[in-house]
Image: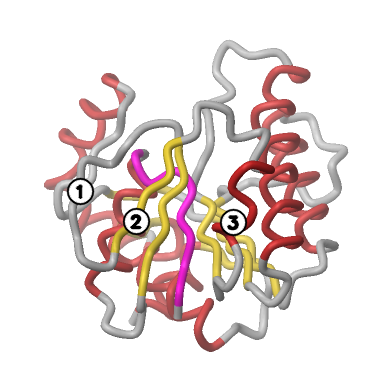
Amino acid sequence: MKVIVFGATGMVGQGVLRECLLDPGVESVLVVGRSPTGHEHAKLNEIVRPDLFDLSAIEGELSGYGACFFCLGVSSAGMGEAEYRHLTYDLTLSVARSLAKASPGMTFLYVSGAGTDSTESGRMMWARVKGATENALLRMPFKAAYMFRPGYIQPVHGAQTRTKWYGIVYAVLAPLYPVGEALVPKYVTTTERLGRAMIRVARAGNPDRVLASVDINRVAG
């Protein structure tokens, strides 16, 4: 299986990229992003694009892939709805359209989040926008599309957030993760499990198109 990863420099994307490089069933990995990952691997190729809204110049290099792991996202903190929608809905759908054109037989896997609002009419702005993004992706002409809605994600194996205060929170909570896993296993996962689950769903499919943390952990094994 040949895969494309968007958002590989973020915390979630780092975890997904690691699992892709470790998985013997993943033949090659193409990372597309605004900055290089800093990794070197025989299976890894990278395309750095300052503007991810326009992939027309590289559409020829996006063909022949079996799956896309879309891990790119921004926090809604301090943003108005129009700006957040532009960087979430508009960007994701722009990339998805290019991929559907270049590799129509691929499976598209999108990292959303717990609390996403599929009705698109709730009170939480970010949840509405994420819901609209999910709904639009599910209508795209891919082989299949799956929405991953993790709750709390514990970074492992060196995965790091680029947001300083998030990093402090993760460092404080790391020793308590086993407690959370024991008490509320339905709401927590790790970057490793998320990456493994995405690969397995891309490879074998899943009965449900939307996966919460409990589903992610089950599929990851």
Give the residue number, with chain letter if any, for mark 3.
Answer: 110
Upstream in sequence: badge 1 or badge 3: 1
Label 1 to label 3: alpha-carbon separation: 23 Å
The amino acid type of the residue labelled 2 equals Asn
Q: Are marks 1 and 2 in contact (CB under 8 Å)?
A: no
Q: Residue 174 is drawn in which quadrant? A: top left
Above or below residue 55? Residue 201 is below
Task: Give x and y (percent) for residue 159.
Answer: 23, 46
Label 1 to label 2: alpha-carbon separation: 10 Å
Give the residue number, with chain letter if any, for mark 1.
Answer: 39
Nearest to viewer (mark 2 / mark 3): 2
User: Tag on residue 45?
Assistant: 2
Q: Which stretch appears magenta? A: 2-9
Residue at image position (82%, 52%) is 136
The amino acid type of the residue labelled 1 equals His
The amino acid type of the residue labelled 3 equals Tyr
* Secondary structure of the residue carrying numbered label 1: loop
Left/right of residue 86 with respect to residue 174 in the rendered view:
right
Residue at image position (18%, 53%) is 40
Upstream in sequence: badge 1 or badge 2: 1
